[in-house]
Amino acid sequence: MQNFKKYKPYPLVHLAHREWANNIITKAPIWVSTDLRDGNQALIEPMNVAQKLVYFQKLVEMGFKEIEIAYPSASKAEFDFCRALIEQDLIPEDVRVGVIVPSIEKHIKRTFEAMKGAKKIIMHLYNPTADNQRKVVFNKSKAEIITLAVEGTRIIKEAAEKFEGDVMFQYSPESFSQTELVFARDIVNAVISEWMPTKSAPMIVNLPNTLEACTPNIYADRIEWMSKQLIDREAIILSVHPHNDRGCAVASAEMAILAGAQRVEGTLLGNGERAGNVDLVILAFNLYSQGIDPMLDIHNIDALLQEIIALTHSRIADRHPYVGSMIYTSCSGTHQDAIKKGMEYQKDVLDGYWHVPYLIIDPKDIKRDYRDVVRINSQSGKSGVAYVLKEFYGIETTKSMQVEIALEVQKLCDEKGIEVNSEEIFKVFRQISKL
């Protein structure tokens, strides 16, 4: 028996003049890595302080200017990591580090202790706001939840005035994706009124898709609606934090940017709770493939990610967009034919643009070899064989010879039941050409 009837459809947003659908992305958002906090807590084996210090350095090398480093009031390990970064003077002048804290006074005080000596920080206040959490978890009314958020904001504001560093404030209605829009607006505007940001000293309003439960277009509608409802909008940096429960986090993030989001929180490779956070590697490459500077160093991405997965004991799926081992590889004969012709055309056209079919970016942009582009199995054709011979051995073959070699290679693949390598193809070529 199917039980789909127990789930309610996600409510629509009624926008009188929807704008995001006609917008285009023209520049990279403010990137925020939450690998060391949100991502780390989702690991089967969370990183220790030494591993997190190495990971932090990799994020800096990649170009992140905002990095959420910890939840220092939650554990001694988190607190100690903050202290290590600060006491060892490992935070560059142009990098702002963030820490998350619940709207509880003792946690706020502990968090400021953890950040003592830091020059530029983000105090990220959150409290759950969804109907089911208000009723089930906290047993509080809407008014009581607003009071909780405003009180936490006041405590942070008072502590920030005494802090010997630059404090930027961030507020997240933590379960925004399950919060009624009108209530989300009311609680966020109450927090803005308490903090009193200005255009020259803005605050961050972060609207998380904490549990992804709607299609990306509805999330974009929610972001646009909120963007138009916030008071002091020019003093607000609008941020999103998409999760991937429906497998749509990347699309949700991109549509949210179209809808007014200026900042995106996520992790490398999408590591995070449940189905993960939005994958910043995919997002950055999506911009790159559209001719937009991603403002992150992704040219050495393979080497960097190998270090990351060693630290986190994770892996990269073979078909992971842009960085999987098979992502630029074709086995289909028709695909191989198009790639071969595209490569030949690319050498002649010289107009500065990329034209090769089936390859969204030039593999050489991330130091991948063209030799990885074509692999030969029983589904391959003559163009694939010709490509391998030319790329590996510099051998040009006639069309008739390509057909003859391809037939023999297919027989070999059928016999072996797996793909054949370049040496085996060359051996077939030598037998047919009598070399």
Image: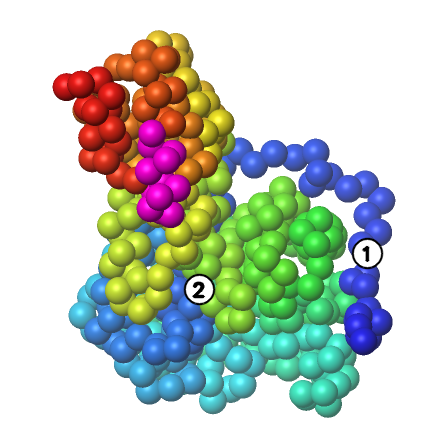
Picture residue at 39% right of the left edge, 10% below the top: 349
Asked if residue 433 is positioned above or below residue 319 in the image, the reply reads: above
Q: Quadrant of residue 258?
A: top right
Residue 220 highlighted magenta (yes or no): no
Q: Estimate the spatial distance between the alpha carbons at disc 2 and disc 1, rounded to whole Å.
A: 29 Å
Instruction: Give the residue displayed 24% in from the left and 50% down from the top.
Output: 303
Magenta span? 408-419
> Where 221 falls versus 343 (above or below)?
below
Residue type highlighted by circle 1: Leu
Residue 87: image x %, image y %?
21, 73
Q: Quadrant of the N terminus?
A: bottom right
Residue where numbered disc 1 is placed = 12
Which residue in the protein does label 2 denote?
Answer: 271
Q: Nearer the viewer, residue 182 or 351?
A: 351
- Determine if residue 116 is in view: no
Q: Nearer the viewer, residue 33 or 88?
A: 33
Is residue 86 found left or right of 10 in the rendered image? left
